[in-house]
Image (spheres, helix red, strand yellow):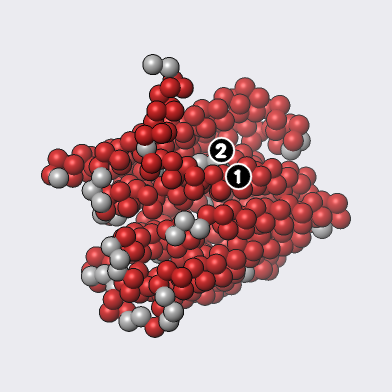
């Protein structure tokens, strides 16, 4: 049987896969166009700011993202799990209560996070940008946090309800707006402030746009007056809040281990090294864009199939999603390995070529994360939120401890190697546990 015949047979015989890919198609089309605009924004940002300035940009934007997520409950995962399950079972009031609780929680956390940014900005500028006078830039860009006041909650509800076209449009609008303003910064010599305005405008478009769409969609799903539903309609308190807090702690671990890598490089080395590392991470980020729609669309479907105890459907979906993500990852990796130096030199300038080495090292770990992107959605849908927390915490503590020893000695390549090792270990263990739980539940059924 030919490979093409196998693919077409799997496609026609798997309605769940077709639904995931169809929903992903809207986001993927947007992502494909967004890649072009994101590349433009990245290219003109590097040419506007140079290597050192690009490292400072990385410090400012990463610090805001870290502060935003520090108190975040990764509330979207909670919404997908509990609102999705409640709607599947026809429990509209419970779904409305969960959505309302999530939105109010995220709103309060957003305000606290911005306050944290304002208070910590002077220290962040001193340690991560190596210039305390840059603190106002940290405060200014931190406005992305209140601008996305219920972004995770909104995005999750839109995913559950199959509202993917509007998300695609908003994501594309964000990319276009950001690229246009960064181009203006390059042509006018606007510098760091204008580049930050570009990224802030983009985040505001998606933050407010997602919120408006989700609140409108909530009225359709839950009925008029849904916001008056009592909190007594929530799922069992212990289960609900254990899931919420474990997801939050998991997100906090990711902050210090994964999402703040550029801050660590700037802290241990300099914004110059941070500029190279930020470009390396940005290049690898382009590999993640085509797979990201699958993450958003597959989690609700995985959760639904598990709620229905359709274990064979779950297995088939995971196997075929892995084939898709694996193909994308291998193609990207081959191009980067063969033509990476030429591409970086042509697009960003010869001075940025040192970013290739950490990019290739990061490719190993992020490649594993890209191929097995379903590891966390699966383990959460199986009701095991604490397992990834334990795995990531132990591996993360080891990574951070080794960073203090290795990065000052061996530079940014050591940071990239530690990151890849972290991904390989944690994802390998989470994938194994998730598949083990599927096999266990299938045996009991």
Q: Residues within 10 Å of mark 1 (few under 14, many from 20)?
A: some
Q: Is residue 276 left or right of residue 70?
A: right
Q: Which mark is residue 287?
A: 2
Number of on-image labels = 2
Mark toward the viewer: 2 or 1: 1
Q: Where residue 424 sits: x, y (%)?
A: 39, 36
Name the residue rendered at 64%, 36% in the picture. 355
Q: Which mark is residue 286?
A: none
Query: Residue at the location (38% across, 53% down)?
Result: 300
Q: Residue furthest left?
A: 444
Using the image, determine if residue 311 lies above or below residue 340.
below
**Residue 370 x %, y %:** 46, 38
Residue placed at 71% from the left, 26% from the top? 342
The kind of secondary structure element at disc 2 is helix
Q: Quadrant of the C terminus?
A: top left
- Image position of 113 (left or right of 423): right
Query: Compared to 415, does 306 lie above or below?
Result: below
Looking at the image, can residue 274 be seen? no
Distance between the Cα atoms at labels 2 and 1? Answer: 15 Å
Q: Residue at x 30, y 40 (%)?
A: 313
Query: Residues at badges 2 and 1 in contact (C-beta under 8 Å)?
Result: no
Neighbours of disc 2 within 10 Å: few (<14), some (14-19), many (20+): many
Eyeballing the image, is 178 above or below 210? above
User: In the drawing, what numbered circle is on residue 29?
Assistant: 1
Q: Nearer the viewer, residue 329 or 404?
A: 329
Residue 48 visible to an observer of this rendering: yes
Percent across and percent down for residue 195 are 73, 57
- In the figure, residue 14 lies in which quadrant? top left
Instruction: State the SS at label 1.
Output: helix
């Amino acid at each position: 049987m030919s490979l093409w015949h196998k693919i077409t047979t799997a496609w026609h015989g798997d309605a769940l896969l077709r639904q995931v890919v169809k929903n992903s198609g809207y986001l993927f089309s947007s992502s494909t166009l967004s890649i072009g605009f994101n590349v433009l924004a990245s290219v003109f940002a590097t040419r506007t700011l140079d290597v050192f300035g690009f490292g400072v940009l990385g410090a400012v934007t990463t610090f805001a993202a870290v502060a935003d997520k520090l108190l975040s409950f990764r509330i979207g995962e909670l919404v997908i799990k509990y609102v999705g399950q409640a709607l599947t079972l026809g429990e509209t009031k419970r779904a409305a209560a969960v959505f309302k609780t999530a939105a109010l929680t995220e709103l309060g956390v957003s305000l606290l996070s911005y306050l944290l940014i304002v208070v910590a900005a002077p220290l962040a500028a001193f340690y991560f940008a190596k210039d305390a006078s840059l603190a106002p830039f940290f405060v200014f860009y931190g406005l992305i946090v209140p601008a996305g006041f219920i972004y995770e909650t909104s995005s999750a509800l839109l995913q559950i309800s199959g509202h993917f076209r509007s998300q695609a449009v908003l994501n594309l609008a964000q990319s276009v707006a950001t690229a246009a303003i960064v181009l203006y910064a390059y042509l006018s010599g606007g510098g760091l402030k204008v580049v930050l305005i570009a990224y802030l405008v983009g985040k505001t478009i998606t933050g407010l746009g997602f919120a408006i769409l989700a609140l409108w969609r909530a009225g359709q799903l839950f009925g008029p007056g849904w916001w008056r539903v009592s909190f007594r309609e929530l799922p069992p308190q212990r289960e609900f809040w254990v899931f919420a807090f474990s997801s939050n702690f998991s997100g906090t671990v990711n902050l210090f281990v994964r999402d703040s890598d550029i801050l660590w490089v700037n802290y241990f080395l300099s914004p110059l090294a941070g500029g190279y590392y930020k470009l390396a991470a940005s290049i690898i980020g382009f590999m993640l864009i085509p797979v990201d729609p699958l993450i958003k669309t597959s989690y609700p479907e995985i959760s639904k199939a598990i709620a229905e105890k359709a274990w064979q459907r779950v297995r088939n979906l995971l196997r075929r999603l892995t084939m898709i993500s694996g193909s994308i990852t291998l193609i990207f990796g081959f191009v980067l390995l063969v033509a990476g130096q030429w591409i970086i030199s042509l697009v960003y300038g010869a001075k940025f070529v040192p970013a290739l080495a950490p990019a290739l090292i990061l490719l190993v770990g992020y490649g594993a994360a890209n191929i097995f992107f379903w590891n966390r959605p699966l383990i959460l849908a199986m009701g095991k939120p604490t397992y990834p927390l334990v795995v990531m915490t132990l591996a993360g503590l080891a990574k951070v401890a080794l960073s203090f020893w290795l990065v000052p000695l061996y530079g940014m390549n050591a940071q990239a190697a530690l990151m890849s090792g972290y991904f390989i270990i944690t994802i390998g263990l989470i994938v194994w546990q998730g598949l083990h739980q599927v096999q266990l539940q299938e045996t009991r059924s």
